[in-house]
Amino acid sequence: MSPFRTTAFAATVAVVALFPPAASGTEIRGAGTVRPLAPGACQRVAAPHPLVREDCEGVQEAFTGLLRSTAAAMADQRSWFDVASGRAWFSGTERFVGCVGDRCGALTFRFRGSFVADLSSSTLRGGRTAVVTRGWGGLTGVTGTVVQRFGHRAGYVATLQLRG
């Protein structure tokens, strides 16, 4: 191959690799609720005073609304509690199995959140943001976020990009 063709080929490969074509898809927004099903298996782990750390596996919940569970969503999370202030921070991963509209499959999320426990009313105020990290089945290629609120007006708002 001539030096000109080699250079042109290398430039084309670089452009395709660095600037992939925009993915076609549809953005959808919707709301719903998340209902706890089971607390999972939790273990208290040593933490600096006055914090309490708790690691939980297999936390189960169900989504209704835009995200519709067909099986229990399963989460693993690490939580830090400041007992004196009633504040907590948490992060983890979750696997959702269900449907978004007429597309069914599975999604995994990475999430972070915080809350304040209101002991006078036994409620939580706060929320979490979950980012889609992968999709399977009819949800392959889905990206987006789910923002959940706890307490008054509890529920979630999802903004998802559906591919294809």
Image (cartoon, rainbow, N blue to C red):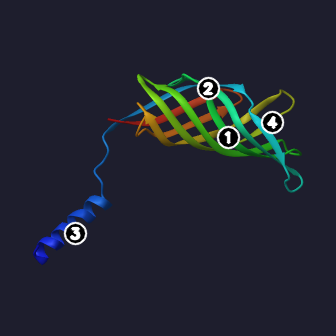
Name the spot of residue 155 as percent of width and height, x first. 62, 27
Tell me how far mark 1 sits from mark 3, CA to CA.
Answer: 45 Å
The residue that mark 2 highlights is 72
Q: Residue at x 65, y 37 (%)?
A: 75
The residue that mark 1 highlights is 76
Amino acid bearing label 4: Ala
- The label nearer to you, 3 versus 4, is 3
Amino acid bearing label 1: Asp
The residue that mark 3 highlights is 10
Q: Is residue 39 above or below residue 12?
A: above
Crowd around label 4: few <14 · some 14–19 · many ≥20 (10 Å): some
Q: Is residue 163 left or right of residue 124?
A: left
Tell me how far mark 3 sits from mark 2, CA to CA.
Answer: 49 Å
Q: Secondary structure at mark 1?
A: strand
Instruction: Pick whichever, 81 or 102, lies toward us.
Output: 102
- The label nearer to you, 2 versus 4, is 2
Q: Secondary structure at mark 3?
A: helix
Disc 2, disc 4: CB below 8 Å?
no
Q: Is residue 60 above or below residue 88?
A: above
Tell me which numbered mark, 2 or 4, is placed earlier along the sequence. Answer: 2
Tell me which numbered mark, 3 or 2, is placed earlier along the sequence. Answer: 3
